Image (tube, helix red, strand yellow):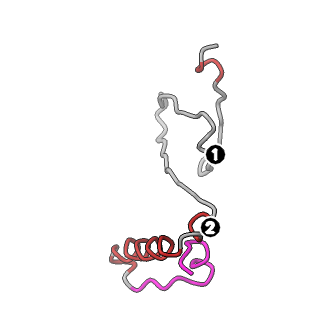
Amino acid sequence: AQVSKMAIRVSMRKGSMVIWNQLLPHGTAPNNSANFRCVQLLRMYPKSMIAAEPQRMKARANALMQFIKKHPSNADFKPTAQQRKILGLE
């Protein structure tokens, strides 16, 4: 069967997000409407995968904080305990 015939349309409300495992075949079709469509790619890993390499985890946390503080409005950014946990900064 032709792959495009097996595709399933995922309709969503404005502001919604769909998340899937990268192993799932996926793609997009042309946006033929007058409505704007935005895509944000995120990559997530289990903490255990990064925690197994403490130097890598520390380098990632430092790089993330440098990136955040690069924007002028974030110069004095002090992450809360929850933000530190979510961003892997602890």
- Within the image, what quadrant is residue 46 found in? bottom right
The stretch drawn in magenta includes residue 83? yes
Q: Could you say whether the residue bearing mark 2 is in a helix, strand or loop?
A: helix
| Amino acid identity at mark 2 | Lys
Q: Nearer the viewer, residue 49 or 15?
A: 49
Within-10-Å neighbours for mark 2: few <14, some 14–19, many 20+: few
* Residue shown at 59% from the left, 51% from the top: 15
Range of residues picked out in magenta: 76-90
> Residue tagged by mark 1?
21
Under mark 1, the amino acid is: Asn
From the image, state whether disc 2 or disc 1 is nearer to you: 2
Q: Where does label 2 land, which residue?
A: 47
Q: Determine whether 13 is above or below 49 in the image.
A: above
**Residue at 63% across, 37% down:** 24
- 78 and 3: which one is in front? 3
Q: Is residue 71 left or right of residue 44?
A: left
- Image coords of residue 86 (percent x, y): 60, 72
Pick whichever of labels 2 and 1 is earlier in the sequence.
1
Task: Return the mark for residue 34.
Answer: none
Q: CA distance from mark 2 to mark 1?
A: 16 Å
Q: Quadrant of residue 87?
A: bottom right
Magenta span contains residue 4: no
**From the viewer's perspective, is residue 56 above or below residue 4?**
below
Which residue sits furthest top? 1
